[in-house]
Image (cartoon, grey):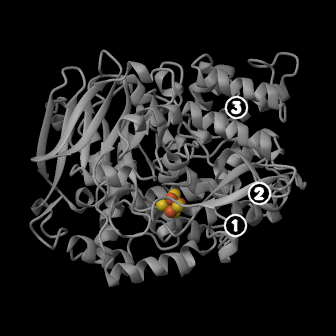
């Protein structure tokens, strides 16, 4: 980035970012220093990519005009803790309106790829068209600035995410990697392909400990483009941490925001896994396709119980003190550590474990590992498989696919493998399409075509307005369970003001765990921007930019054909309320109708003028 001002909100065009546009069809590259149009573009991530996507009229995700945009945020690669995010954006193969138009999506992950990408000198890469042959892109530092090359990738075809990364590491030992698995290669039948991002620990240990940009099928879009991997080769540009950033980082680790995510040995709850313990007292842990039974079955996957038979090790990304994920290893009879199996984060563990009726930690771990290796979004995969199981429970005489039922590990495993190999479009294309084909849509747990994360919709009607997946783009999932709010005013305020601010993290390059409660509009972020980039930004300016970016995403959904009726939660929730969930009912038809009316009253007037006009759209052609 080039900063010719220190006041980016007042003078955004004096901030320029380095963009490379790659035409995959011809191999042509175009580098440019692009002036920002507003603070959202300065911050980066989806704040920038969605403005570009809004300029395209895209009617199907798999078309030459749909770009794949890879970018970072202002604080990616900085000394600010968690500053490791990479963003992948495009029109999604899986998230679509009932009119059949694809929604704009972004997906993001940590690991060290984002920092290495930034350190090549690039801020954004746009992949146009598609390549005739499989390729990977090598990004590296050159004497005159960043260099991008396309290289043949035939030797990577058919390899898992982890195998691709390890194969590339042999050639580029000082680089980090982003790669798709076999699922993304089978983009025609798999719309939920994820992008794996390499971690330091993975490259050192050789174990498959990737992080993932999973949501929205950006790995499938990459596969469609015949782009199998990205290699970011640059020297590490870590610098001495300033006193201001040091203070912030200590606050991130010791302050309230991430405390519960810390390892148990440091007084925390043991990563995202701790959500099990928070929700089980209310019987709100998803079980058997989001139908908790009021029993103690979820407790079988509580950490304390898993630790009896497996070795668990808390793990962090490069230089991060939060240590939010856990690695699960076999435990030998003498108590020593055995083979690495998988990482345990809350969403994959629940959605490929308890929510499939699998209560054996080893089996859940193997399913997580399979999904990761094939490169599928664990949320979309788990929820689509749980739909199959729920259908089969209802139709034992005429089941779907292999007739798998809840808890039937062998058959569930078979479904995951067939989906990953591209042999099972019924699963690979997600729960919306599958449920529409069976005609039984009420218990397909997706909203607007994207499967729900592992928080019961009974606890979160805010899912309806999330613009890029339930818990990552609308922070209302704890409003009832953690904050105890069940009145309509709190929910309107949460959805339309405070909880939408969570998307700020998907612009600036930080993880949400940096400060999950307050978002990015804080003095901590102001101090980091000042110290790392020399920029003077106020919390009010940040809040306004995040709000505009969120609303632009909402406006873009509506332009892709979503009707207001699609802003709702799965019908089973209010048609057959689950009496086992011990929480106030905030998903009755009356509550949802009132919430919808009041939320749109706030949002609608603000959507005006956020998108290019139709005239602009036709004028813009892909480069
Ligand atoms: S918060 Fe978790 S995912 Fe984010 S950088 Fe730290 S360890 Fe990695």
Q: How far apart are marks 2 and 1 (CA)?
A: 9 Å
Q: Nearer the viewer, mark 1 or mark 3?
A: 3
Q: As rendered, which of 195 and 518 lies closer to the eye?
A: 195
For residue 481, which numbered disc appears in the image? Answer: 1
Q: Are marks 3 and 2 in contact (CB under 8 Å)?
A: no
For residue 284, which numbered disc appears in the image? Answer: 2
For residue 298, which numbered disc appears in the image? Answer: none
Nearer the N terminus, badge 1 or badge 3? 3
Residue 54 visible in image: no
Residue in the picture at 85% in, 57% down: 308
State the quadrant of the N terminus.
bottom left
Nearer the N terminus, badge 2 or badge 1? 2
Q: As rendered, which of 383 and 145 lies closer to the eye?
A: 145
Q: How far apart are marks 3 and 2 (CA)?
A: 20 Å
Q: In this view, does 578 lie to the left or right of 89?
A: right
Q: Are marks 2 and 1 in contact (CB under 8 Å)?
A: yes
Q: Distance between the residues labelled 1 and 3?
A: 26 Å
Q: What residue does disc 3 label? A: 385
Q: In this view, does 304 lie to the left or right of 263?
A: right
Q: Decide: few, some or many residues near mark 2? Use Cα within 10 Å; few <14, some 14-19, many ≥20.
A: many
Nearer the N terminus, badge 3 or badge 2? 2
Q: In this view, does 23 lie above or below 15?
A: above
- Residue 601 position, x and y percent, is 44, 59
Q: Which of marks 3 and 2 is in front?
A: 3
């Amino acid at each position: 980035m080039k900063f010719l001002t220190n006041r980016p909100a007042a003078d955004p065009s004096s901030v320029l970012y380095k963009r490379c546009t790659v035409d995959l069809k011809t191999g042509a590259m175009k580098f440019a220093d692009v002036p920002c149009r507003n603070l959202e573009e300065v911050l980066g991530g989806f704040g920038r990519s969605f403005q570009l996507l809004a300029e395209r009229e895209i009617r199907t995700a798999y078309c030459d005009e749909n770009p794949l945009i890879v970018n970072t945020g202002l604080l990616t690669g900085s000394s600010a803790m968690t500053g490791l995010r990479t963003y992948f954006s495009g029109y999604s193969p899986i998230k679509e309106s009932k009119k059949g138009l694809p929604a704009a999506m972004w997906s993001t992950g940590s690991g060290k790829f984002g920092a290495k990408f930034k350190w090549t000198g690039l801020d954004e890469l746009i992949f146009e068209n598609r390549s005739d042959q499989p390729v990977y892109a090598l990004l590296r530092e050159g004497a005159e600035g960043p260099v991008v090359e396309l290289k043949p990738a035939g030797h990577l075809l058919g390899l898992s995410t982890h195998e691709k990364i390890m194969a590339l590491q042999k050639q580029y030992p000082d680089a980090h990697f982003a790669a798709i698995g076999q699922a993304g290669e089978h983009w025609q039948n798999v719309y939920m392909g994820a992008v794996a991002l390499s971690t330091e620990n993975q490259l050192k240990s050789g174990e498959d400990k990737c992080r993932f940009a999973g949501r929205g099928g950006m790995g499938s879009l990459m596969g469609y483009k015949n782009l199998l991997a990205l290699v970011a080769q640059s020297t590490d540009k870590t610098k001495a941490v300033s006193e201001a950033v040091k203070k912030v980082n200590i606050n991130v680790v010791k302050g309230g925001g991430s405390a519960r995510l810390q390892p148990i040995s440091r007084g925390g709850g043991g990563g995202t896994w701790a959500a099990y313990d928070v929700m089980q007292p209310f019987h709100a842990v998803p079980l058997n396709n989001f139908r908790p039974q009021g029993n103690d079955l979820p407790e079988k996957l509580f950490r304390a119980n898993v630790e009896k038979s497996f070795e668990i090790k808390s793990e962090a990304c490069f230089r991060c003190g939060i240590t939010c994920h856990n690695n699960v290893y076999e435990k030998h009879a003498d108590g020593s550590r055995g083979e690495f199996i998988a990482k345990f984060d809350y969403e994959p563990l629940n959605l490929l474990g308890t929510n499939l009726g699998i209560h054996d930690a080893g089996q859940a771990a193997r399913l997580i590992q399979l999904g990761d290796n094939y490169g599928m979004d664990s949320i979309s995969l788990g929820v689509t498989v749980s739909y199959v199981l729920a259908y089969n429970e209802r139709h034992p005489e005429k089941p779907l696919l292999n007739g798998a039922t809840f808890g039937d590990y062998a058959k569930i495993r078979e479904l995951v493998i067939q989906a990953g190999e591209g042999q099972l479009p019924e699963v690979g294309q997600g729960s919306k399409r599958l449920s529409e084909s069976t005609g039984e849509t009420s218990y397909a747990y997706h909203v607007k075509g994207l499967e729900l994360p592992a928080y019961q919709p009974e606890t979160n009607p805010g899912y309806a307005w999330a613009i890029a997946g339930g818990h990552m783009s609308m922070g209302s999932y704890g409003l009832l369970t953690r904050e105890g709010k069940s009145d309509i005013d709190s929910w309107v305020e949460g959805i339309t003001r405070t909880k939408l601010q969570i998307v700020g993290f998907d612009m600036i390059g930080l993880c949400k765990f940096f400060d999950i409660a307050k978002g990015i509009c804080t003095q901590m972020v102001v101090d980091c921007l000042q110290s790392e980039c020399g920029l003077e930004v106020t919390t009010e300016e940040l809040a306004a930019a995040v709000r505009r970016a969120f609303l632009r995403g909402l406006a873009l959904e509506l332009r892709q054909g979503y009707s207001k009726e699609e802003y709702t939660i799965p019908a089973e929730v209010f048609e057959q309320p689950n009496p086992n969930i011990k929480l106030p009912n905030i998903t009755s038809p009356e509550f949802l109708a009132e919430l919808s009316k009041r939320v749109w009253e706030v949002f609608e007037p603000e959507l005006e003028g956020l998108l290019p006009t139709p005239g602009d759209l036709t004028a813009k052609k892909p480069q």
